[in-house]
Amino acid sequence: MPTAERFLQARMARPSRTVFVVLLAAALLQMAWYYPRLPERMASHFDAAGRANAFLPKPAFFILYASVLGLLSVLFLLTPMLLARLPNGMINLPNRDYWLAPERRSLALAKVQAFSVGFGNGMLLFLLLVFRDVMRANLLEVPELSMRIWVFLALLAAFSIVWTVRLVRSFRLPV
């Protein structure tokens, strides 16, 4: 890939990647802060009313959290970078033939990468908030999850809808 195309891809995704790295660092700091304060047996699953109904040993809970963070990092940071190596037929975009034409392919891939990392930021922020609430619930005598979780889910749903609309609109055909 020519240098100008690489520069374009990196420039479009850079602010989103910076936010992602900051959120990832915040999650790691969150884990470091809560780990010594939490009980050895942690509530890890809650019913719709917020009552704990499944438990994990503390190390397993934190391994799960770290694994989810790692999976998000691969999905939203590394996978979009691999798109450049795929043939056009394996990339699903609105108006694919137009956007993946040789003269626009770099721009299209840069946009996909920026959108992907942006969505990853929303997912990472959601996980940060949810895991924070789960860890705070485990500091209580009887672990009970705050009903804020429903607000977080509603915000994630709204974010996902807005993100999807923006993605589809950005790949419209020019008029």
Image: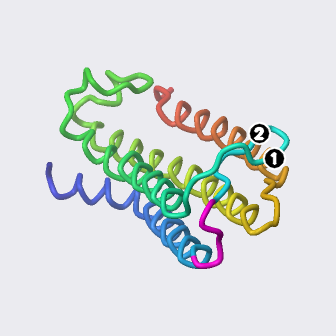
Q: Is residue 102 magenta?
A: no
Residue 112, quarter of the rendered image? top left
Q: Amino acid at mark 2?
A: Asp
Labels 1 and 2 touching (C-beta < 8 A):
yes
> Dot 1: few (<14), some (14–19), or many (≥20) neighbours within 10 Å?
some
- Residue assigned mark 2: 47
Towards the viewer: 59 or 120: 59
Residue 153 rendering spot, x and y as whole percentages: 73, 43
Residue bearing mark 1? 50
Instruction: Magenta stretch: give its range.
Output: 36-41
Q: In the figure, is residue 168 to the left or right of 133?
A: left
Q: Check the image and report above or below for 46 versus 144.
A: above
| Residue under the image location 60 percent in, 54 percent down | 127
Look at 50% across and 50% down and name the residue there: 120
Name the residue located 49 percent from the left edge and 66 percent from the top edge: 24
Q: Position of residue 173 (x, y in %)?
A: 46, 26
Percent position of residue 125, x then y:
61, 58
SS for callout 2: loop
